[in-house]
Image (cartoon, rainbow, N blue to C red):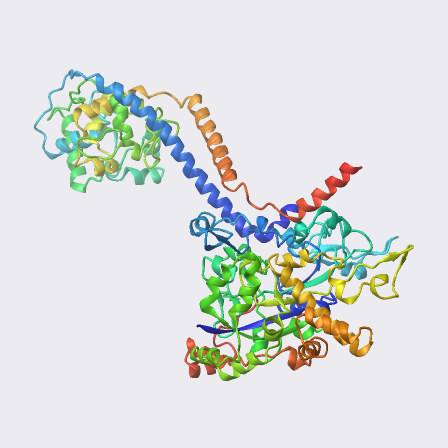
């Protein structure tokens, strides 16, 4: 047993309103430099949709992540020899057009244009070339558009739906979409780290944050292909790759990352998980439909005395273990089994989990009118059967969150439905106690758990959402530096000489 | 705009392009060499069948033994290009040269001709033009050696010693095919010297010719006054550069004859247009082949995702209409 700590995340998709505040907060702090204009370390996608970069989930095209081949785990990008052969030319890179060409507007024209017959306009100009351009796409093109013919219709997750199901999604009554905010997953088995020929990417020992050394990076750009989530970006100005750093400078000083902190819908949770590093390899080799179970199994119970002893033996402090015991992520992922990893079949063991969104049910038409009153089969679908009458087929969600295992997604939904029925029974008295009892049985839950889920979902405090572990950087540096040497050197200009520009 | 959109990936495309270029050049060279080598080995086998019969080509003259150091040096260093009283060779006949030229000038000229040419000495420049633009080489003679040579030249003028009759050494019959083999290095020199091709180029040894360190030898036969001049040159190797390489490893007489025969054969006025066409065709075919190969190797590369996706939809819409 090799217990390590990982700062992990949960995004509760039911609460996401698609406002992109997270993306803007991240952009303002980290990526409004030259060369990073097109990067969105945090982005919000409309699903069904092709995402950012276009069709990032289609590994037939991008060759990201891992694949299981005859009992061993291989990078889908290339092996050692293939990597050497392609070292000067990685053939599976997205072009800037697949992300989008970043632009701004010539606002000066509004004030400085010579007098003429027409109103001056601020024409769009490319932030890369500085020339006029026609805007063709953006990082969330077709935002808020369910059923758009190009981007929504080509969502790779729709691939397993029948032709009939797909065409139904374009009917007005069935039109559906939800939002999928994405940041780096800080995986346990990161494809980017494995693909880097320079050894520039590493997973921080004390908290599992995956970082790129800006000194070691040699711009081979294998990480960009290696990451199946396309969350490593190449800075064309500095010639180095960059990615989400989970705002580690904020975490180290006890603040939540900027995207978490600014989230309007309060969908984001952050906390520590303890996992068994010895079992990473066997976990990644699980069959597709058992990956979620294997992933849950690798996360260890922070209350188990054996786990605590093993964690202490690995140098994890009492304060960290205490943070792991209070982690909201542990509750959502392991205790309640509500949060699922995104595309576990990429086998990188992502440590960002999603509570799938409650699906809107299909309204019934009677005599040309939507039936909104009545109970049972007469009106809106009864609560319990809402899963069967969901507009979006479960198979879509299973393709997204459970490697195709519909049973796992269905179990999550049954529990979420039970919470909804139980809480509605308390407040609007819609359901009878029998129905509530039945819902709890089907959802495999109990009143205490329902209350806890409700509390953490609907009314969590700031401290409950973000249980930031004391990262104790001053102790973490001991591994490589004498703390007394480090302390006076952390000030201005000691570790790196101050430099004009650059 | 399209071109500029690719800009973020510019370092990559540069690396790819340069990589491809290096690859292409390498492959092209390999191809050309393979072709020329095949040609050579063919001609080599024909050559070995005909065994050359040694015949005395020209009567060797009486070489005076008397005359001291000056005569010896003259024999070794000067007779490749100069005669005394037997007419112009590569350089002028030196009969009466002591009377013609100022002694100081003559001393400087024999000691450092290269420097005088560089300084645009009027006589030197005129001589250069007169004698096919073949410059008088710096023979690295010491002051006393130069004085000895001048003394010897004076003595011949005054009839005190016999002027040497320039004579090509008795050479056997040369075989041009064997000469080509020696030139290209398919056959080694007996003394172990490097093949001529290492430094020199000549027409008739394949489209790429040879090295460019030394001068092109295509017209050397006529420039050096045919068999007599070239023969003496090959036997004495008087130029400093050549002497450094060949001084300790003289060519065998059969080798000299073969090389002369080969150089006499290739002494055409210019390279044939055929050879130039061949070279261009090889370059074009080679480049196309390398490009085709790289395309084949990376045929599954990702060439944009969003554009094709949108294009597909627009085409479908157009088809519907």
Residue furthest to the left? B66
Q: Is residue A266 above or below residue B93?
A: below
Q: In terms of depth relative to the viewer, which is nearer, A137 or B165?
A: A137
Q: Is residue B262 above or below residue A497?
A: above
Q: In terms of depth relative to the viewer, which is nearer, A399 or A253?
A: A399
Q: In terms of depth relative to the viewer, which is nearer, B111 or B8?
A: B8
Image label count: 0
Horizontal side of B135 relative to B236 (left or right) equals right
Q: In terms of depth relative to the viewer, which is nearer, B281 or A262?
A: A262
Horizontal side of A38 relative to B61 (left or right) equals right
Residue B136 position within the rendered picture, expressed as x and y whole percent measured from the top left: 28, 33
Residue B317 position within the rendered picture, expressed as x and y whole percent measured from the top left: 77, 41
Horizontal side of A151 relative to A76 (left or right) equals right
Residue A417 quadrant:
bottom right
Residue B191 position within the rendered picture, expressed as x and y whole percent measured from the top left: 17, 33
- Can the viewer see residue B305 in this picture? yes
Q: Is residue B51 above or below residue A161?
A: above
For image coordinates 92% across by 55% down, the residue present is A367
Residue B148 quadrant:
top left
For image coordinates 65% across by 62% down, the residue present is A409
- Can the viewer see residue A24 in this picture? no
Q: Quadrant of the C terminus of chain B?
A: top right
Residue B17 position within the rendered picture, expressed as x and y whole percent measured from the top left: 51, 44
Residue B126 quadrant:
top left
């Amino acid at each position: 047993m090799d217990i390590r700590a990982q700062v992990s995340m949960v995004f509760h998709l039911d609460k996401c309103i698609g406002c992109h505040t997270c993306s803007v907060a991240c952009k303002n702090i980290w990526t409004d430099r030259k060369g990073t204009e097109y990067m969105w370390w945090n982005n919000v996608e409309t699903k069904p949709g092709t995402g950012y970069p276009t069709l990032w989930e289609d590994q037939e095209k991008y060759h990201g992540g891992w694949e299981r081949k005859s009992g061993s785990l291989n990078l889908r990008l290339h092996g050692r020899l293939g990597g050497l052969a392609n070292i000067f030319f990685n053939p599976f890179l997205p072009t800037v057009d697949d992300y989008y060409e970043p632009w701004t507007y010539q606002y000066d024209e509004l004030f400085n244009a010579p007098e003429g017959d027409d109103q001056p306009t601020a024409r769009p100009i490319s932030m890369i070339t500085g020339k006029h351009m026609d805007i063709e796409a953006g990082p969330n093109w077709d935002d808020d558009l369910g059923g758009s013919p190009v981007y929504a219709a080509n969502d790779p997750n729709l691939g397993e739906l029948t032709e009939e199901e797909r065409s139904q999604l374009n009917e007005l009554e069935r039109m559906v979409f939800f939002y999928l905010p994405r940041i780096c997953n800080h995986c346990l088995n990161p494809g980017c780290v494995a693909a880097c020929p320079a050894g520039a990417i590493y997973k921080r020992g004390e908290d599992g944050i995956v970082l790129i050394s800006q000194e070691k990076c040699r711009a081979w750009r294998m990480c960009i292909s290696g990451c199946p989530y396309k969350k490593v970006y190449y800075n064309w100005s500095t010639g180095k790759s960059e990615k989400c750093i989970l705002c580690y400078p904020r975490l180290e000083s006890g603040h939540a990352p900027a995207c978490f902190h600014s989230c309007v819908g309060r969908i984001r949770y952050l906390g520590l998980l303890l996992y068994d590093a010895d079992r990473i390899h066997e976990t990644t080799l699980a069959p597709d439909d058992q990956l979620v179970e294997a992933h849950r199994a690798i996360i260890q119970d922070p209350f188990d005395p054996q786990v605590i002893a093993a964690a202490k033996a690995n140098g994890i402090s009492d304060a960290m273990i205490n943070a792991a015991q209070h982690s909201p992520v542990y509750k959502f992922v392991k205790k309640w089994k509500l949060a699922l990893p995104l595309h576990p079949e990429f086998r990188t063991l992502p440590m960002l989990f999603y509570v799938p969104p409650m699906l809107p049910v299909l309204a019934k038409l009677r005599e040309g009118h939507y039936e909104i009153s009545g109970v049972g089969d007469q009106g809106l679908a009864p609560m319990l059967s809402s899963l069967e009458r969901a507009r979006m087929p479960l198979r879509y969600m299973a393709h997204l969150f459970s490697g195709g295992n519909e049973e796992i997604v269905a179990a999550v939904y049954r529990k979420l439905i039970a919470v909804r029925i139980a809480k509605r029974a308390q407040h609007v008295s819609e359901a009878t106690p029998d129905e509530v009892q039945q819902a709890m049985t089907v959802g495999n839950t109990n009143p205490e758990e329902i209350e806890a889920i409700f509390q953490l979902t609907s009314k969590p405090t700031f401290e409950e959402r973000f249980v930031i572990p004391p990262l104790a950087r001053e102790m973490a540096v001991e591994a490589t530096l004498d703390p007394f040497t480090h302390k006076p050197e952390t000030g201005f200009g000691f570790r790196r000489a101050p430099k004009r520009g650059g | 705009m399209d071109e500029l959109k690719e800009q973020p990936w510019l370092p990559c495309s540069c690396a790819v392009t340069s990589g491809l270029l290096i690859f292409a050049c390498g492959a092209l060279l390999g191809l050309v060499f393979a072709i020329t080598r095949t040609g050579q080995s063919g001609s080599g086998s024909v050559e070995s069948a005909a065994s050359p019969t040694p015949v005395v080509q020209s009567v060797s003259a009486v070489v005076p033994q008397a005359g001291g150091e000056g005569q010896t040096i003259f024999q070794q260093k000067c007779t490749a290009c100069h005669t005394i009283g037997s007419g112009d060779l590569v350089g002028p006949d030196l009969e009466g040269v002591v009377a013609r030229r100022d002694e100081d000038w003559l001393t400087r000229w024999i000691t450092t001709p290269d420097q005088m040419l560089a300084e645009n000495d009027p006589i030197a420049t005129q001589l250069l033009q007169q004698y096919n633009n073949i410059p008088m080489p710096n023979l690295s003679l010491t002051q006393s050696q130069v004085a000895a040579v001048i003394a010897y030249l004076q003595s011949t003028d005054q009839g005190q010693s016999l002027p040497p009759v320039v004579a090509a050494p008795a050479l056997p019959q040369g075989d041009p095919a064997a000469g080509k083999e020696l030139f290209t290095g398919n056959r080694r020199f007996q003394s172990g010297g490097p093949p001529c091709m290492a430094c020199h180029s000549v027409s008739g040894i394949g489209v790429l010719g040879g090295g460019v360190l030394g001068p092109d030898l295509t017209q050397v036969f006529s420039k050096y006054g045919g068999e007599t001049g070239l023969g003496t040159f090959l036997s004495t190797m008087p130029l400093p550069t050549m002497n450094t390489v060949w001084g300790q490893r003289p060519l065998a007489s059969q080798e000299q004859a073969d090389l002369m025969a080969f150089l006499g054969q290739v002494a055409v006025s210019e390279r044939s247009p055929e050879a130039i066409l061949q070279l261009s065709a090889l370059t074009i075919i080679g480049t196309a082949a390398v490009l085709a190969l790289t395309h084949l190797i990376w045929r599954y590369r990702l060439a944009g995702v969003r554009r094709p996706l949108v294009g597909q939809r627009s085409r479908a819409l157009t088809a519907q209409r």
